Amino acid sequence: MTYISKPKLHHPGLLKNAAGFTRRDYEGAVSTLCAGCGHDSISAAIIQACYELDILPHQVAKLSGIGCSSKAPTYFLGASHGFNTVHGRMPSVMTGANLANRDLIYMGVSGDGDSASIGLGQFAHVMRRGLNMVYIVMNNGVYGLTKGQFSATADKGSVSKKGLPNSDSSIDLVSMAILMGATFVGRSFSGDKRQLVPLIKAAVQHKGAAFIDVVSPCVAFNNHAGSTKSYDYVREHNDAVNFIDFIESRTEITTDYAAGTLQEVQQHDGSTLRLRKLNDAYDPCDKVTALNQIQKAEAAGEVITGLLYLDPLPKDLHENLNTVDTPLNALVEADLCPGQAALDKFNAGLR
Amino acid sequence: MKATDISNPDYFHKVVDCQWACPAHTPVPEYIRLIAHGRYSDAYMINWKSNVFPGILGRTCDRPCEPACRRTRVEDETVVGKREPVAICRLKRVAADYKDDDIGAMMPKAPAKNGKRVACVGGGPASLTVARDLAVLGYEITIFDQDPKLGGFIRTQIPHFRLPESVIDEEVGFIVDIGNIEFKHKRIDSMKALLTEGYDAVFVGSGAPRGRELDVPGRQEAGANIHIGIDWLSSVSFGHITKVGKRVIVLGGGNTAMDCCRTARRLGGEDVKVIVRSGFEEMKASPWEKEDAIGEDIPILNFLVPKAVTHENGKITGVTFEKVKAEYDAKGRRNLVPTGEPDPHYPCDDVLVAIGQENSFPWIEADSGIEFDRWGLPKLSETTFASSHPQVFFGGDAAFGPKNIIWAAAHGHDAAISIHKTLQGEDASERPAPGMNIVSQKMGIHEWSYDNAPSDENRRKVPHRAKAEALKDIMAEVELGFDPDLAWKEAQRCLNCDVQTVFAANLCIECDACVDICPMDSISFVDNAEESLLRGTLMAPALNLTQDIYIADGLKTGRVMAKDEDVCLHCGLCAERCPTGAWDMRKYYVEMTQAEHACHKR
Ligand SMILES: Cc1cc2nc3c(=O)[nH]c(=O)nc-3n(C[C@H](O)[C@H](O)[C@H](O)COP(=O)(O)OP(=O)(O)OC[C@H]3O[C@@H](n4cnc5c(N)ncnc54)[C@H](O)[C@@H]3O)c2cc1C
Ligand SMILES: Cc1ncc(C[n+]2csc(CCOP(=O)(O)OP(=O)(O)O)c2C)c(N)n1
Ligand code: SF4
Ligand code: SF4
Ligand code: SF4
Ligand SMILES: [Mg+2]
């Protein structure tokens, strides 16, 4: 944390986006996280993505649970809606909010403790339901806020700062999310914004349950030798299968790619997602082989990153429930109470 | 790009835009911080060492530091209206105004004489600087001036409503009081004769004492009411002239013209106009001088070239002008071409001619061993100020034509080094490197020994004496100076550009914390490339080519850290955010080496 707030002064060449905002306008309060915490970099990536997407801040709701990661929403999108839930319960609050107002962009921010330990049940169900959301886990393998106990995503055999190995099996949130029915699943690294920012942008545009697991080193408790969530370990074992290059449908491809390295995915709204493939064999649209490859990489000790699974034609909760297009919180009495004549007609049908 | 060599004193010196731009390289942010702390005497001494005349310069300096000030690049126009530098110059005056009365005790005293004698021709700031720098080394100095008191143009030209004589007396006194300095009220008429008087070296600081003539019909006939500006100003200064006609035309667009017109307003001029060949923007006068003149109800008329002085019965009636406009040729050079409109005529009672100054050395004989170029200026080495005569050095306006006080002081320091080295048998062309003192500012995890929060306040205005009162009394100083409260507020605007961001690649874990927190997008981690390419790949494109990119290599990913120095606020947030201490905020106190420490053997 810092004692002075970030100066309002900004680079004289700072540009405004189509919504009339600069990148700085998407910032929040000055962070109180430890200096060097990966979570701050993810916040910066979210800021950059929202700026690039010309998002209107008041159309975003950020929700989180408990943890250093769950504190992070205070440090970005200061002009958006926010809700800090009890530990592990962010998904149910987000589900309720989404049902009430389907027009907002829902951004759930959680930690590996918040989502894989106390909140694992809620995590599974929100993915199953296909809530239209971006769910980001800032994954550091520890409970940072409570001083660094192993979390459920810590790899078996990885060593704590005090030198003790972890004996429990780890939960792989990416595999879980795919199994539970999430329709956009990616993994990235807080130290690689070139990969992370486009991934967040694509997730925001995905009309369904989008989940991104972001490995985010905890500099205070999990950045030592023997950790598998440290800056050095992730950099050495990062196995990126692809990069998202373009999202808009009408952007021309200006870079030359070797044959077969570009994968185009047609999306629900007709736009095209263009992926630069780093691994020829990886096809994120094929669930079975994707899961297979993820398991193989994990077994080999690689941190597989990129867009790992995508269902380009997702169905979200509202579609499944067949709700009206108007947000439920905008329905007025006349919409909800059709009047005596309608009731009489309905009752007559039951006689 | 190659990794930056931060051990080169020039690298971080250049980041301190004001200090780099100051001809004498005054450590500006250091004295501004001392003023903020109320340590006026210490602030004064820093200035006194570098620029010799803090009280004088704090009122009159041409302040090349201010247009260079970082604030002019970083302020948010939507908040402050216009980007403005720190009031560096007027803060200097605060140090002079509020220093302790016994500051004389902090001044050096001359040691035992070293047996060598140096003559200075002219008693202006250039000679006074040479005298000060050499007297403390034991040299015996004799200063000759044709005018009765020391100070040169500072005393005879600059009007007292801008610079009270008491300030000149005090600061000339600090120099003479060192000892070993003798003033002789005498005009030097022969360089050859002077050279036979046994001086080990001669410094020529005789200025550029001739005002350029107006060459138009009627000049001779109406001569009684046409005055050369600098001669007229010195006559006013000496009290020989106390009145001027009601209607005055001042010709010229430089600072002399501004002093002439404002002086005329105080000597009975009611309808005073400045009439200039060029456009308003191209005028040589500093913007603040023009502002002050306009503020005293003096209109400035542009694009008018004097054509003839009109007169009747030997008495001036006015001046006729030709209207011109600026046209630019293919090479972008400006030409003033007549518009063809009728010639305007402005009636007047007096004309003050302030259209330029020239050097003149009638007293230096052609066979004295000193060579001159075809413009009448001495042939000099630009670093040592040595002339073609081994014992003769030049400085100030006499060296490269009319400049200003701070340049005269800077020349004086350099010439003093050359004289000292030459007389000690060393090679004067080997110049001493500046001194550098590096201190980390870290006090605690988030605590720095400087005020690191940048202020977004507007520049403060110096209070002025009420106009009616000021115009009544030619001796009444117009500017009243900042009081300590205003001075503190203005001092807080300084960004402490001497507190440098210093990077240690071996400690960096590339977590991006500094990149994310930097309010100015100054820091990037990128693949190395040649400079022109790399400048485009940074967080914000580095378009200001006059500002360096700080490059550090040796990172684990093979990328480089690239910091654009251009708009860094020196806020220290990068260093606060860095988990490993790879960034540190270190004060680089760069001090020019003066004659005192310029020699190897002493
Ligand atoms: C009207 C006016 C206003 C100015 N205002 C400012 C200002 O506000 N700020 C600023 O920075 N600069 C100002 N200047 C410029 C500044 O005064 C000069 O640049 C500066 O004084 C030059 O210093 P110097 O030591 O080279 O010579 P000078 O100050 O010119 O001193 C030279 C001295 O040598 C004497 N001298 C010359 N020949 C001989 C000789 N043969 N024998 C004996 N003595 C001799 C002269 O009488 C004079 O006293 C102004 C100039 C003028 C004309
Ligand atoms: C109901 C409840 N149980 C336990 C806690 C204590 N607690 C606070 S934060 C936390 C773990 C947070 O870990 P994670 O979500 O990984 O966040 P991080 O700090 O690592 O970013 C725990 C167990 C709590 N606040 N509430
Ligand atoms: S404890 Fe760990 S997770 Fe929490 S702020 Fe510090 S570095 Fe980040
Ligand atoms: S902000 Fe201060 S240190 Fe920086 S250039 Fe301006 S006066 Fe000098
Ligand atoms: S001091 Fe550091 S954080 Fe502050 S503006 Fe400069 S580079 Fe950026
Ligand atoms: Mg955690």
Image (tube, coloured by chain):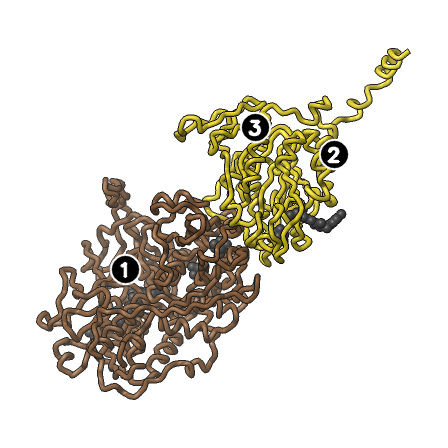
Chain colours: A yellow, B brown
For the residues marked 3 and 1, what is the alpha-carbon distance in whole angstroms? 88 Å
For the residues marked 2 and 1, what is the alpha-carbon distance in whole angstroms? 81 Å
The residue lying furthest to the left in this view is B367
Q: Is label 1's Cβ within 8 Å of ligand 1?
A: yes
State the quadrant of the C terminus of chain B: bottom left
Are the numbered discs 3 and 1 placed on the same chain, yes or no?
Answer: no
According to the picture, the residue beneath numbered tag 3 turns out to be: A289
Relative to A98, is A150 above or below?
Answer: below
Q: Is residue B218 visible?
A: yes
Q: Is residue B141 left or right of residue B446?
A: left
For the residues marked 3 and 2, what is the alpha-carbon distance in whole angstroms? 34 Å
Residue B254 % position (x, y): 31, 58
Q: Is residue B320 left or right of residue B531?
A: left
According to the picture, the residue beneath numbered tag 1 turns out to be: B354
| Mark before the other along the chain sequence, 3 or 2 | 2
Secondary-structure class at tag 2: helix
Disc 1 residue type?
A: Ala
User: Which corner quadrant of the image does residue B19 belong to?
Assistant: bottom left
Q: Residue at x 65, y 41 (%)?
A: A171
Residue A96 badge: 2
Disc 2 residue type?
A: Gly
Q: Residue at x 39, y 81 (%)?
A: B107
Q: In this view, does B500 lie to the left or right of A77?
A: left
Disc 3 residue type?
A: Thr
